[in-house]
Image (cartoon, rainbow, N blue to C red):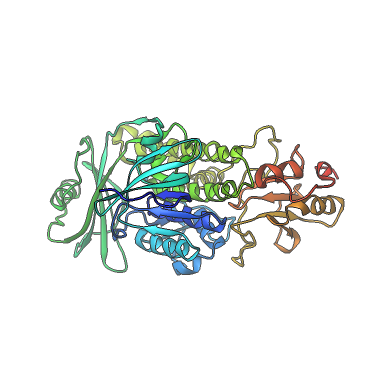
Amino acid sequence: MSSPVVEPVDVVVVGAGPVGLMLAGELRLGGADVVVLERLTAPIEESRASQLGPRTAELFLQRGLWEALGDPPQENTGHFGGIPLAAGGADGPVPGNRKVPQPRTERILHDWATGLGAKVLRDHEVVSVEQTADEAVLTVRTRGVTASWRARHVVGCDGAESVVRRDAGIPFDGTPAEREVLRADLKGARVSNRRFERLPRGVAVSSTSPEGVTRVMVHEYDRAPGTAPPSFAEVAAAWERVTGEDVSGATALWTDSFDDAQGQAAVYRRGRLFLAGDAARVHVPAGGQSLNTGLHDAVNLGWKLAARVHGRVGDDLLDTYDAERRRAGQRVLANVAVQNLLLFGGSRYDRMRDLFGNLLETPVFAESLADMVNGVGERYPAPHERPDDPLLGRRLPPCPKPRGTAFLPPDRGVLLLDSDGPLARASREGAAPWVDRVDVIDERDLVGLLPSPVRAALVRPDGHVAWTDRCDRSLGDALHRWFGPPGHAPEGLSDVREGM
C-alpha cells in the first residue's frame, strides 16, 4: 500500500540516536527545516554509550544543555588501551569525562531539537534513498504504508548498516572482526569493581552505578566473534570462565556485544547525501569515542548545511565537512586500533603496554594523547596557511575558566579582537558587512583567550578558529569562505592582515 508524496523539506536526518538528534538541533539553530526519521517505535532504554568527553561537554555548555544534564560528576582519569590516562580538557571550562546514560542524553537532545522546531517521527523506516540533480527522494515505510519523501539533503545517522551509505554507493573500507567483547547490565550481581583487569583467560571490566546496576564486560582471548547477539547465559558463562565468579543468579536488564571490526566510508558526502557517526565509521567504542566523535560530526555539519540551504554559501563549504571530519575519523581509527591491541591482544603485547605505560608518565605526551582521544586537540586542516599559527584550525573553549557564560554563540561566527589599535579598527570595519552572521567581541574582557602573538581571530559556529591575523589570507577572504558573500560592498578588507 502506498500514499502520496510528502511535502519536501530542507533536510531529512535518518536516525534518532544522539548524533541524529544533535544534528537536528544544529540545523534548526541555522534555520533549516528538518525532519528526523527513526525506524524504532520508542527510544532505547539501555545505557549503551555513557561517556561524554570534555569537548562534548563544552559543546553542550555552548548550547545551554549542560544544566539539563545536572552537571554530572567529573572523572579526571580515563584510559588508553586500559592504561590510566588523564581525561584531558584542562584548558577548558569543563575538564574531565562525565558519565551520562545514553537514554538521558537522547532525551535532552530530543527535547532541545524539538523545542527548536525539529520534527522527530518514529516508526518511520527508510527503505531506500535516491538523488537527482535537484533533490533526494526517500522511500519510507510506516505501519505498512509506503510514502515518498523529498528533501534537498539527506544525512545518514543510521548506524553501521546505513541505508543512506548503501544507496549513495559509498565504499566502506575496513578490516573484519577478530575479537569480541560481551557485556550486560545486571541487577543483583555481587562482583568487585574491575578496571580492565587482565586475567589468564581474558579481560574483565565491571562497575556498579549508584542505582545498583552493575555493568560487566568480558573478553576471552582467542575466541572468535559470534554471529548473533549473546544471551545472558552466554555472558554469564564467559564471565565465569575468565573471572571464576558466578553471576548467573543476577537479573539481566540488557545484554549486548561488540567486536573489533573497523573501517570508514571512502567519503562522508556524495552529492546531496551525507554520513555522520557510525554510518561513517565503525570501531571499538574505546573511551566513548564512537558517541563523542559522532556528536562532533553533527556540530561540524549542521551550521554548514543550514547555511547552504539558505543559499548563503556554495557547495565548497559542504566539501569541508568531508575534508575535516573524515580526517578526524581516520585519527580515531588509528588510535582505536592501537588501543584494541593493548586491551585485548594477550600477553604478546606486554612490551607494547610497558612502552605506553612509560610514555604516559611524561606529562606532555599524556596531555597530547588525551586531547587527541577526546577531540579537544582536533585541528582542522588549513591549506596554504602558516604552520606556526598557534590557533588556526583549533577549537576555542566556549567560555573562560572558571566556567562562566558561554560567549561563543552556536549559530553565529565571532571575531575576537584584543586591542583598539589599527588592526582592531580595520578588522571591525572589515567585518561590518557580515554583521548579520558574525559578532565582534573585545577579547580583553575574556581572560586572555588569544595566545601571543595572535591579536585577532575569527571563530566558526562550531568553535574552531577559521582565521587569525597571523594568516596570509585576508579577513575578508576568510569571512567570504566560511560565511558567504558580504551583505554590502566591503571596504578595506584586504588590508586586515598581520603586521598592521
Identity of the residue drawn at 54% across and 65% down: 64
In the displayed structure, does residue 190 sit left or right of residue 51? left
Left or right, 91 with respect to 205, comes to right
Residues 426 and 271: in front is: 271
Image quadrant where one finds the C terminus: top right
Q: How many marks?
A: 0
User: Relative to the observer, which residue lies in front, 493 or 104?
Assistant: 493
Q: Is residue 472 above or below residue 450?
A: above
Residue at (32% x, 68% y) in the render? 210
Q: Is residue 153 above or below residue 188?
A: above
At 56% from the left edge and 40% from the top edge, which residue is drawn?
318
- Residue 466 locus on image (x, y percent): 66, 45
Where is residue 333 shown, x and y percent of the image?
Answer: 43, 37
Q: Where is 408 relative to 302, above or below?
A: below
Residue 53 showing in the rendered view: no
Q: Say whether residue 299 is left or right of residue 227.
A: right
Residue 190: percent from left, percent from top: 20, 62
